[in-house]
Image: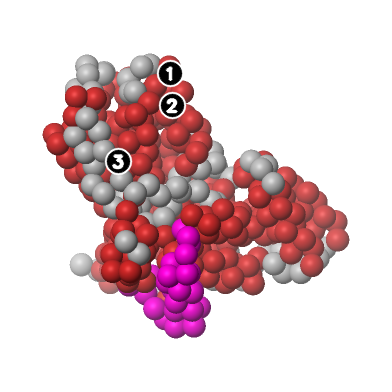
Amino acid sequence: MTEGASSRGAALREIASLFLKLGAIGFGGPAVHIAMMEEEVVVRRRWLTREHFLDLLGATNLIPGPNSTEMAIHLGYLRGGWMGLIVAGASFIVPAVLITAVVAWVYVHFGASPKAGPLLAGIKPVVVALILAAVWRLGKTAMRGRLTLLIGLLVLAATLGGVDEIVALFAGGLLGGALLFARRERPVGERPQADQPPASPAVFINVPAPGVGVSAAAVVAGAGVSLWKLGLCFLKIGSVLYGGGYVLVALLQSELVRGRGWLTEQQLLDAVAVGQFTPGPVLSTATFIGFLLAGWAGASVATIAIFLPSFLFVAALGPMLPRCRRWGIASAFLDAVNASSVALMAAVVVKMAPAAIPGWRALLVALAALLASLLTKANTAMLIVLGGIAGLLFLR
């Protein structure tokens, strides 16, 4: 084996190890996934600079699909080329898919999904703390001056005021980019190395559910749904999914409940709840639904179909990012999108905090996790595990 081949193999093993871990312990939705990735690849492993991370994160906000999964794919491509792109995405997705498939099997055969209330009661405050720590670290990089700070504050206010996240993101990018380009708030031009492509973070708001119960008779597994039709349906959803968990629910309801009558409202709610309380991407909901409708084959088809567009979008976009960053007006737009994206993450903290931190004990858990994340080199996986233990012991 040549030295180059050995080096590529080591990089791919490192990519697989990291994203399998993040996929297995990534409770709380894309905002916390992104925070965990930033801590791992910027702070601990130094794969890239925080500016570059923000650019990649911004790019995921500008294309359809699950943002944290696309971020994993971007990072895999950066670290390991085309094979790294595939390995990172698959590694991040597989743990959630396997867990969700097992839950679906239990749901179909025993009529209930596991209860996860006490565990989540401890994990949710940690999730909020990790997102807040990432907002602090990324914000120091994204808010390069008074104008970028103003853009971020306006986007935060608009989002908390009810403006759609995607609308706020694009508005912040367009308005802020025009102002930044006009005022030349900072020099734009070629960055030092290919270590600096474009864009900003995406926020996929997760609403954790404590667990669901259902009558086994209500399950429709193997209801004669064509695998071909099932695949096309989820391919369509994966190709147009902008926004977050609420958008996913709306699309699933429109396509599967009202449009095709494949699921009942209760089954859809159960599927979404399972996607919420399992780790990794919330789009593993597709695995659960596919299993209900067509068994293991349906789970496989639905999973591949809903995630496939993300791989294709990132594969098309990844090589273009460095060139976009060298173009003055595009660079200004990306700076504004980066500031807007950090504001979206801050909005997630504000929205999640009341439910995630309902009392003083949960607040203590959140503060301990925040201080550990900002002041020490505490591993995010360990903080998640300790939060779960705290929930089981003190927050029942």
Identify the residue at image location x=46%, y=53%. 30
Q: Secondary structure at mark 1?
A: helix
- Drawn side of residue 340 relative to residue 352, left or right: right
Check disc 1 and report the residue beneath it. Answer: 258
Label located before the other in sequence (2 or 1): 2
Label 1 crowd (10 A; few <14 / some 14-19 / many >=20): few
Labels 3 and 2: the sequence-earlier one: 3
Q: Quadrant of the N terminus?
A: bottom left
Q: Is residue 207 magenta?
A: no
The part of the image, by quadrant, that contains residue 151 is bottom right
The answer to whether residue 147 is seen in the rendering is yes
Circle 2 residue: 253
- State the residue at coordinates (59%, 45%): 62
Q: Residues within 10 Å of mark 3 (few under 14, many from 20)?
A: some
Q: Residues within 10 Å of mark 2 (few under 14, many from 20)?
A: some
Q: Nearer the viewer, mark 3 or mark 1?
A: 3
Please provide percent x and percent y for residue 154.
75, 54
> Mark 2 near mark 1, Cβ–Cβ under 8 Å?
yes
Q: Position of residue 150 (x, y in %)?
A: 77, 61
Circles 3 and 1 in contact, beta carbons < 8 Å:
no
Label 2 secondary element: helix
Q: Which residues are magenta?
A: 356-382
| Residue 249 higher or lower than 375, as above or below | above
Q: Amino acid at mark 2?
A: Gln
SS state under label 3: loop
| Label whose residue precedes the other's in the sequence (3 or 1) | 3
Residue at the far right in the pictured view: 183
Q: Nearer the viewer, mark 3 or mark 2?
A: 3
Image quarter where the C terminus lies is bottom left
Disc 2 to disc 1, C-alpha distance: 6 Å
Residue under label 3, please give it: 212
Q: Label 1 is placed on what type of residue?
A: Arg
